[in-house]
Image: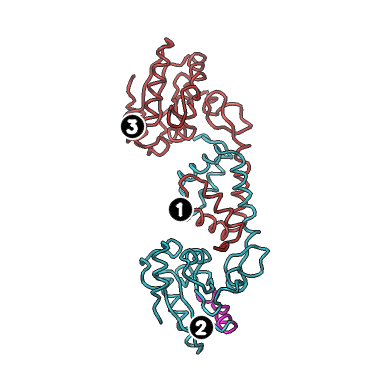
Chain colours: A cyan, B red
Amino acid sequence: MAQLLPSALLEAIEELGRLPGVGARTAERYAYFLLRAQPTTTEKLAATLRKLHSGVKQCPVTFALIDSDQTVSPLYDDPSRDKTIIAVVEEPLDIVALERTGNFNGTYHVLGGAISPIDGVGPEQLHIPELVKRIEDDQVKELIIATNASVEGESTALFLQRHIQERGITVTMSRLARGIPVGVDLEYADQITLSHALEGRRLL
Amino acid sequence: MAQLLPSALLEAIEELGRLPGVGARTAERYAYFLLRAQPTTTEKLAATLRKLHSGVKQCPVTFALIDSDQTVSPLYDDPSRDKTIIAVVEEPLDIVALERTGNFNGTYHVLGGAISPIDGVGPEQLHIPELVKRIEDDQVKELIIATNASVEGESTALFLQRHIQERGITVTMSRLARGIPVGVDLEYADQITLSHALEGRRLL
């Protein structure tokens, strides 16, 4: 079959098709939309994507995503927030979901994933040593283990609980309440459900 | 609420959210995926988007999308294709859908939309005069009006039929068969349904 579309459009379709959950038809739709949009719209999208990697880095303490010119996460730096309470999450976007509840005034720690033997992710790839260090440095009183309500999230929570108990560290540990529908990623939970889950957290 | 995500990430989320059907959560997911992907992946996407507008233009005869260094659509230029049969479509991507059937050896004419009073699109905004000129220049014998099976597509087909009859132009006109499920855009129809629709086209 001869080439039916211009090369530039085909390339855009191919690259947009790499986005998660985007099939060939959706990629075509996106590319055609961008082609019909004002050149400035497409140019602006391209420009933001170009500086995405250089503009973002990890907070060296909490592993949240921060501006590349910041030294530490503003949520950690904020003196009004309680550094002795840490919500431990899998991914940086989980922080956004929890902050949207407006119901948490502690700080965060991003593990950088969850234990998943199938995906080859073991506890050694997660930011657990840095969490243990923070518990000591900031005299942390409570850990809210806010991993996803998935098999991997549960395994990670269990591992973390044992790991900290084995080290004889005295810290209150809790899990988010079972208000979160099982199988739903934290990032997609609605604000009210998440708010209930924060309030109803169970002691471990 | 303080800024929870780095500016560069927020900007990428905002720009990705302009894509059709993409809400805030999906835009977050796309942006985070691109942030975690290799910088070359994101850079390549940005590069293809940057040259999207400059690399694509409209064929001056058929109004299909072509490479900016081509003079005319390769499907029109191809001597093995029958210039006396024209399939009239609303949008350039409809050509891709029809070509996938492998069941059509004529040429195409892109109207550039459909008549839609609500969206302020009247017949004068469509490439109808150019179609009339082609019918004369290429001694066209048959017009297959392959507009979408929507209210707008049907109105456009009816308008086109009357417009050509009023001009006393002798050309056989047909519509794609009613095999296409009503309400589905041509671009999303499956190949077999489209193939049946081509074969069973009705004389007007």
Residue marked by disc 1: A21
Estimate how packed mark 1 is, as few (under 14), some (14 to 19) or many (20 or more) residues with alpha carbons within 10 Å. few
The residue at 45%/69% (across/down) is: A118
Q: Which residue is mark 2?
A: A141
The residue under the point 52% across, 52% down is: A18
Q: Label 1 amino acid?
A: Gly
Residue A30: where, in percent of width, then height? 50, 44
Query: In the figure, B25 relative to A28: above or below?
Result: below
**Magenta-drawn segment:** A122-137
Distance between the Cα atoms at labels 2 and 3? Answer: 69 Å
Of label 1 and label 2, which has the lower sequence position? 1
Question: Distance of mark 3 from mark 1, alpha carbons?
Answer: 30 Å
Q: Nearer the viewer, mark 1 or mark 2?
A: 2
Residue B7 is one of the magenta-drawn residues: no
Q: Dot 2 falls on which chain?
A: A
Q: Residue furthest right?
A: A69
Quadrant the C terminus of chain B occupies = top left
Residue A71 versus residue B104 in the image, above or below: below
Type of the residue with mark 3: His
Residue A21 or residue A7, whichever sits in front: A21
Disc 3, SS:
helix
| Furthest residue toward top | B168
Q: Chain of mark 1?
A: A
| Residue hosting label 3 | B196
